[in-house]
Amino acid sequence: MLGKVRDPGATNADLSMFKEFGLSPIREGMRLEYRLESFNTFNDPQFCPPDVTFGGQIFGQTFYTRNAPREVQMALKLYS
């Protein structure tokens, strides 16, 4: 066994956007908020560390990723 081997770097980008629409003509102080949120926006894989069992058939290879694929969610929120 070789001990610890450095992992590949981990980068992640999460983005969110919000937009508010005033609805005062309908009711004073009323507004609608639209949200768009994205997790792992650029869909970059983060690989697990390679196998460190010296002499094994898969020595130095990595097969798995540790992050989830891109997720996007949208929401509307009404403030009255």
Image (tube, rainbow, N blue to C red):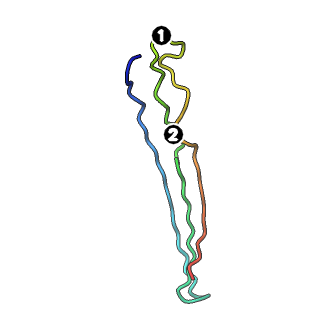
Q: What residue is shown with label 2?
A: 44
Give the structural element (helix, strand or loop) at label 2.
loop
The residue type indicated by label 1 comes to Gly
Instruction: Tell me: 52 left or right of 73.
Output: left
The residue nearer to you, when weighing 32 against 67, is 67
Front residue of this view, candidates 34 and 69: 69
**Few, some or many residues within 10 Å of mark 1 (<14, 14–19, 20+):** few
Residue at the image position 49 percent from the left and 16 percent from the top: 59
Q: Earlier in the sequence, mark 1 or mark 2?
A: 2
Task: Give the x, y percent position of residue 74.
Answer: 60, 61
Three-letter residue code for mark 2:
Asp
- Image location of residue 62, percent across then percent down: 51, 25
- Residue 55 badge: 1
* Alpha-carbon span between mark 1 and mark 2: 31 Å
Q: Residue visible at 46% across and 45% down?
A: 12
Label 1 vs label 2, nearer the camera: 1
The quarter of the picture where residue 57 lies is top right
